[in-house]
Amino acid sequence: MKSLSWILTLPVLLLTSVRASTDLLMEDFEEPVSEEAAAQPGPWLEGDWTFEGTAFEGYGKKFGTRVNGRIAKWYPGQLSQGKLRTQGHRGRAMLKSWGRRGSDIDGETGRALSPVFKIQRKFLRFLVSGGRYPRGACLNLLIEDKTVNSLTGNNSNHLKPIAFDVAKWIGKEARIEVVDRETGAWGHLCVDQFVQTDFPKGARVVRNSGNEVEDVVWVGDERLRGKVRWSGEEIYLGDRRLDPESVRSLSLGADQSNDQSTSGFIVFRNGERWQCEIQSLTKEKLSIHGSFGYGARSIELSSVHSLHFGPIPEGSPQPIYRPGMLYRTTGSPVPGKIAWIKKDDLALDSALGILPIPRQGLLAYVFPDSPVKPASADLDEVGLKDGSLFFGKIRFANEKMFFLERSGKQPMNVAWEKLRYLIRSGKDTFWLNGLASSSKESHGPLGPDDGVRSMDYRRASEPSLFALRVLPKTKLNYRIPTSPSGKSFLQTQLAPLPNSRGTVIFTLSIGGKEFYRKKLSPDAIPEKLSIPLPKGEELTVGVDFEERIAYPCGVDMHDAHFALADIVKEDSPK
């Protein structure tokens, strides 16, 4: 039996060996321990990296070379020196953009460019950490000297595995570019372990970041994908003309992060977020300069919830900051009340008196007794590429701009090229992510569980704006909005949970009577639903296991909403 077991195991071992042999380790940044070791062939790229600026001082020198009187090393500051402690790196060395000694982690700037190499595998896998500054502190893949993919850190010290999908460029020559032009909070980048492979092996896969991501539009009972464009006074998706007033949501997927500002932002008590440069604070008046065109403004401090002196990671939840605390990149938070803000510093009125604190390295401050009250559910939501968020009523104009009408305030003119997404709400459309379920049941195999998660994709490279992720053994109940015609629809894009391993059953019921049932296997193709709802007051959404229990599994309801019959064609296919 032992020999039979060994024979059965042999194919698996051979397969594992074959897979492992396909990897091409291109660069690990480990320094040779001696001149003899340096002369031996290694796993590194053929040729030398080139470096500019002070951020990478000491890199690329031959063994024993002295820089400013010190031996040059591949790890300036070393892992045991400097102010920052990283996690997740491999070996003793990596590429870091914080200078040779690591004494000014965010203040150094520079550029590192790899030698030319040929793409021979489907993925380029690597480790990365540092700040989220698109185009400012980022790792780029260059083909024919053009950036075909770009990635930033996520405001974290933990190096995470990432894989660029490069299958379409196999056989092409490429270069890796690491750029650090930022000196603000998290203005640095760390990278390690560049490997060409056919297997991502748990790394987050990033597709090319060119202008090939489709726009997504909900109009009538249809969810359309393509390229939104204007022609004269009319809007088109591909060759199809759209009625602007029938557009209920719009997500512009192409080049989403190009305008992402590296400045700070403010959050208002009504939930709005203005990306801007925070200039000064005097006599309860906050002076700012807007990044998308509203220019210099003076704002009543009583309308502000919090100040943020640098960007936050894309796709990450808002960090939890305690009111009345000034947060910094280094050191403990400082309690107190902001007395004034100037160009280079601010003053904090604390128990120790008035403390002047340099602005460099500041993260955020939340004003005491300034809760955020969500905007009215009947207001439209507008998100811009720079990260700004506004509420009002949208009025389409032309290919140059649209208008955002705001209660008691002057309308805002917004240029189309600045738009990232819009969500229209009101009497005709009710989005489930903004509706509280009237009741919820969730009971997994191991006991009561929270089987519902709200996924926010408004700032991510996803083909939807948000999703409700519903796990098995869960039931959600929603009050159905009343329609003048008495007819309502549930519309959504239904898809299995990413990396799902089990099949689930998705059901819809009203008054205890089931009227829709769908089996979703792990490989099921996402399906658009536009379902007329039977008469009733409450809709029950249910998700359950099939015969077998397998984790993970579940259902994602992308952009789920109630649409009244007045805006849905009755004769359209369902």
Image (cartoon, rainbow, N blue to C red):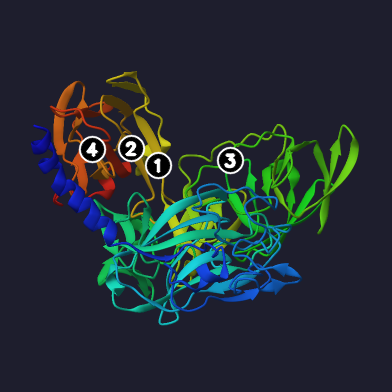
Q: Amino acid at mark 1?
A: Met
- Is 17 positioned to the left or the right of 284 in the image? left
Q: CA distance from mark 3 to mark 4?
A: 41 Å
The first of marks 1 and 2 along the sequence is: 1
Is 266 placed left or right of 206 in the picture? Answer: right
Q: Residue at x 20, y 31 (%)?
A: 508
Q: Nearer the viewer, residue 528 or 103?
A: 103
Say above or below: 389 vs 515: below
Relative placement, left or right, of 39 versus 241 is right
Residue position marked by numbered label 4 in the rendering: 487
* CB-based contact (under 8 Å), mark 1 and mark 2: yes
Q: Residues under labels 4 and 1: Cα distance?
A: 28 Å
Compare marks 3 and 2 and give the one earlier in the sequence. 3
Q: Which residue is mark 1?
A: 455
Nearer to me, 116 or 36? 36
**Cα–Cα span, label 1 and label 3:** 16 Å
Which callout, 2 or 4, points to the residue nearer the camera? 2
Query: Which disc is residue 469 wearing?
Result: 2
Name the kind of residue labelled 2 in the image. Answer: Arg
Q: Residue furthest front?
A: 36
Left or right: residue 31 compared with residue 240: right
Q: Quadrant of residue 506?
A: top left
Residue 258 in view of the camera: no
Residue 525 in the image, given as x and y percentages of width and height: 18, 50
Which part of the image, by quadrant, shows the N terminus? top left
How far across and how far down the image is residue 288, in percent?
72, 58
- The residues tagged by marks 1 and 2 sit, at their Cα atoms, a distance apart of 7 Å
Label 4 secondary element: loop
The residue at which mark 3 appears reads as: 319
